Image (spheres, helix red, strand yellow):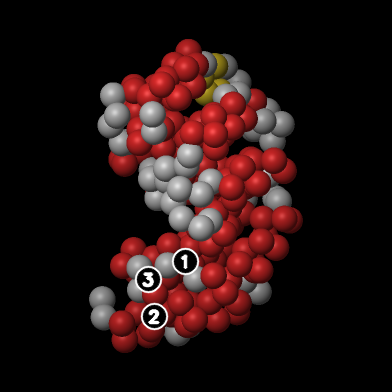
Amino acid sequence: MTIDEIIEKLNSKKSADRRRGAKEIGKLKIVQLGEELYQKYVIEKLDKRTWETQYEMIKALGSIEFKKAIEEIEQIVRTNIPHDMITMASGTTYVQLKRKSIHDAAPVLELLEFGSISVIDGALLALAIDQMKPNENEIRKILSYCKDINKHKDRIGHEFGLIDSRQYLAIACANWDIELTKDFLNHCIDTAYDINSFGKPVINQNLIDVCKNSLKGKFSKAYLL
């Protein structure tokens, strides 16, 4: 898709077209369309029916690191709605816009301090999708905080259909020092349970597989969104 075709999609009256345009900008990292995308998002956010398109626009703004969007994104993050895809995308984008480099996990730690499960998922997803490599101290803090994040208050009673947030962190661990991550990964394997539609615990094989991959230093790209 050409630049002109993407702009045409962003200006379409059809939400599906605008969504596709945003996806292309994020996928191809077309930085020069940041202002165009941002202005379309400001309009898009007024229509609650188009949350899927807003989700893709927010993701794209993070992918191209369009820092002008930070106030809009921070407002969503601070509103802190649990079980909300727009909030989750904003958590990821917030980290991408606030960090100084892929070695800077300060924004992740900031969001872990107060975030709903959606904000937390977004923050941990940023670690994985961008293969961030924080310093040893930040890694230790993140792993310690998230050891039992599957028991977050927003998740209890809503486990069915929700991803275990630790899966994103476990993916990121593939690029980190195994001496720092092995205890966390093995703990996740030992506690890798989901709740099914009948309220019964079942093995979370995806989490187990990701952890085993990371213990071998293998990045589990296929398990990302």
Locate residue 99, reporting x and y percent.
53, 56
Mark pair 1, 2: CA separation: 11 Å
* Residue 140 in view, yes or no: yes
Is 107 situated left or right of 26 in this image? right
Q: Quadrant of the N terminus?
A: bottom left
Q: Are marks 1 and 2 in contact (CB under 8 Å)?
A: no
Considering only vertical position in the picture, is 109 above or below 39?
A: above
The disc label shown at residue 65, or none: 1
* Residue 198 in view, yes or no: no
Q: What is the secondary structure assignment of the residue under circle 2?
A: helix
Q: What is the secondary structure assignment of the residue under circle 3?
A: helix
Q: Are marks 1 and 3 in contact (CB under 8 Å)?
A: no
Locate residue 202, reporting x and y percent.
49, 17
Q: What is the secondary structure assignment of the residue under circle 1?
A: loop
Considering only vertical position in the picture, is 189 above or below 28?
A: above
The disc label shown at residue 50, or none: none
Mark pair 2, 3: CA separation: 9 Å
Q: Mark 2 points at which residue?
A: 32
Q: Nearer the viewer, mark 2 or mark 3?
A: 2
Considering only vertical position in the picture, is 9 above or below 171?
A: below
The amino acid type, in three-letter code, at marker 1 is: Glu
Residue at point 39%, 33% (across, down): 176
Mark pair 1, 3: CA separation: 11 Å
Residue 219 occupies which quadrant of the picture? top left
Residue at point 40%, 50% (across, down): 130
Q: Nearer the viewer, residue 134 or 42?
A: 134
Q: Mark 3 points at which residue?
A: 25
Q: Residues within 10 Å of mark 1 (few under 14, many from 20)?
A: many
Q: Which of marks 1 and 2 is nearer the N terminus?
A: 2
The amino acid type, in three-letter code, at marker 2 is: Gln
